[in-house]
């Protein structure tokens, strides 16, 4: 069953879309916290995103750019804006299609089916997924998943970035500067406190798959992976 995520601050429109999609057998996720769209997206990992442009705090263009850093999931913009430049902006910011409000639900369904066929159907472009492996540990950066001995946990984009650096550098130390550089975002500055918080979260993700003490702090230098589970998890 394909999962569709709806990001629309008009509750009536969101409910109407959700009801129509569920009638056709789709699983539907409706966003309610418009400050955490990227977090919900990575938690749910939908097959397609319906994204309004006019949203509280940040607009749909911003959220699409954030999602595009880690996902090629089809994004269809919804908007009451009818100008050609708005449609150009939608495509340039990572969108795949644009639907103008008010819209007929059947038009939305047709566009959703079209995008799902292109992304996941027999004519979808095939690509080799990246997998970073290290002594039984497997990181899937595009999926935002970490696996070890058939146990899997989901990651945020920043957690996956940190793990990619740590695994690439193993058994060497990953310097704080290197990690901060990886976490750098053109929208915001990631300070050292943010790095500390994310390292703590990475350690908790290891614990979720049965691995303790996976990330060692090297005082004054940075962090290093500790690989001690080659023949089974602890």
Image (spheres, grey):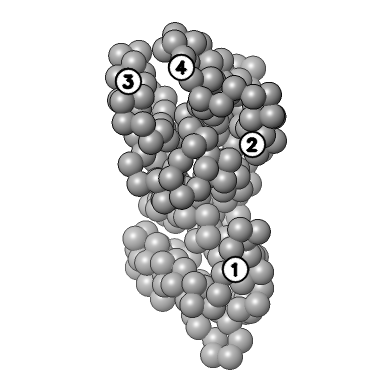
Quarter of the image where the C terminus is located: bottom left
Q: Which residue is mark 3?
A: 16
Q: Which residue is mark 2?
A: 94
Residue 60 percent location from the top left of the image: 53, 39
Picture quadrant of residue 203: bottom left
The answer to whether marks 4 and 3 mark residues whose Cβ atoms lie closer than 8 Å is: no
Which secondary structure lies at badge 3?
A: helix
Looking at marks 1 and 3 on the same chain, the residue that comes earlier in the sequence is marked by 3
Query: Residue 189's mark?
Result: 1
How many numbered discs, if any? 4
136, above or below 10, in the image: below
Residue at image position (64%, 30%) is 86
Between the C-alphas of marks 4 and 3, the distance is 12 Å
Residue at image position (61%, 78%) is 176
Residue at image position (49%, 10%) is 107
Residue at image position (67%, 34%) is 89
Looking at marks 1 and 2 on the same chain, the residue that comes earlier in the sequence is marked by 2
Residue 139 seen anywhere in this rendered image of the structure = yes
Quarter of the image where the N terminus is located: top left
Say which of 99 and 135 sits in front: 99
Between the C-alphas of marks 4 and 1, the distance is 38 Å
Q: Residues within 10 Å of mark 4 (few under 14, many from 20)?
A: few
Front position among marks 4 and 1:
4
């Amino acid at each position: 069953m394909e999962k569709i995520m709806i990001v629309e601050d008009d509750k009536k429109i969101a409910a109407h879309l959700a009801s129509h999609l569920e009638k056709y057998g789709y699983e539907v996720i409706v966003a309610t916290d418009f400050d955490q769209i990227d977090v919900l997206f990575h938690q749910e990992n939908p097959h397609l995103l319906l994204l309004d442009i006019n949203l509280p705090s940040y607009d749909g263009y911003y959220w699409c750019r954030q999602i595009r850093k880690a996902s090629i999931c089809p994004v269809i913009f919804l908007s009451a804006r009818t100008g050609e430049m708005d449609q150009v902006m939608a495509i340039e910011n990572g969108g795949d299609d644009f639907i103008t409000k008010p819209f007929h639900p059947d038009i939305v369904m047709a566009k959703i089916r079209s995008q799902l066929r292109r992304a996941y159907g027999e004519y979808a472009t095939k690509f080799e997924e990246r997998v970073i492996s290290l002594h039984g540990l497997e990181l899937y950066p595009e999926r935002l998943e970490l696996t070890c001995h058939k146990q899997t946990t989901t990651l945020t984009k920043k957690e996956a970035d940190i793990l990619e650096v740590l695994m690439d550098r193993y058994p060497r130390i990953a310097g704080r500067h290197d990690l901060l550089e990886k976490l750098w975002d053109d929208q915001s500055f990631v300070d050292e406190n943010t790095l500390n918080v994310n390292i703590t979260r990475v350690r908790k993700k290891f614990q979720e798959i049965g691995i303790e003490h996976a990330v060692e702090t090297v005082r004054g230098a940075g962090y290093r992976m500790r690989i001690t589970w080659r023949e089974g998890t602890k």
